[in-house]
Image (cartoon, helix red, strand yellow):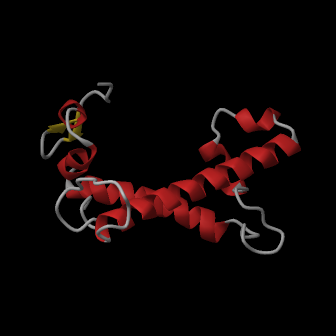
Amino acid sequence: GVHFPGLCSFSEGVSFEDISKLTPLEQWAAVPALGKAQILLAIGIIEHNSEWKIKPHYMAAGGKPGDLKGLKSFWDPAGLTSKMSAAKLERQRLSELKNGRAAMIGIISVLIAHNVPGSIPLPINFPAGPSLILPF
């Protein structure tokens, strides 16, 4: 498959090519602990900047969901939204919020199906082990 060239970890000799041949959970397991920490730290920094540094907060009076002024160039580096009308941008934001909510419902549904026997009518063979900590 398509992957980055070189090594993912120089100290452990893990290459992106090796990782690209694995299943998603095996890929996560193959990433060294410091690599996982870097990924989670990057997500945490982005979350911190979007939740604590942008005023007004998007959930407070005067704020708009999906309007992250401080991270605008981060999520739209090509400037695709700069040419949109205000109505279209509002529609796109609403679509993104709905898609995010649908994804959260999907994840919770899979966790429920895995942990509550008989909760869905389809027989699905989930991997053994606790589902919430399986990726770590």
- Indicate left or right for 109 with 115 as reference: right
Evaluate whether residue 112 shows in this view: yes
For residue 75, above or below residue 65: above
Q: Residue 71 placed where, x, y %?
A: 64, 52
Q: For the view shown, which residue lies furthest in the left direction? A: 12
For residue 50, above or below residue 28: below
Rendering quarter of residue 16:
top left
For the C terminus, which image quadrant?
bottom left
- Indicate left or right for 104 with 73 as reference: left
Q: Residue 13 placed where, x, y %?
A: 13, 40
For the N terminus, which image quadrant?
top left
**Closer to the camera, 60 or 38?**
60
Evaluate whether residue 132 shows in this view: no
**Closer to the camera, 43 or 133?**
133
**Closer to the camera, 134 or 73?**
134
Rendering quarter of residue 10:
top left
Q: Residue 119 placed where, x, y %?
A: 37, 67
**Closer to the camera, 128 or 116?**
116
Which residue appears at 38% of the width and 61% of the height?
120
Rendering quarter of residue 7:
top left
- Indicate left or right for 117 with 86 as reference: left
Q: For the view shown, which residue lies furthest in the front direction? A: 121
Please give the count of numbered marks on the rendered protein. Answer: 0
Which residue appears at 24% of the width and 62% of the height?
134
For residue 125, above or below residue 9: below
Which residue appears at 28% of the width and 54% of the height?
123
Which residue appears at 60% of the width and 46% of the height?
74
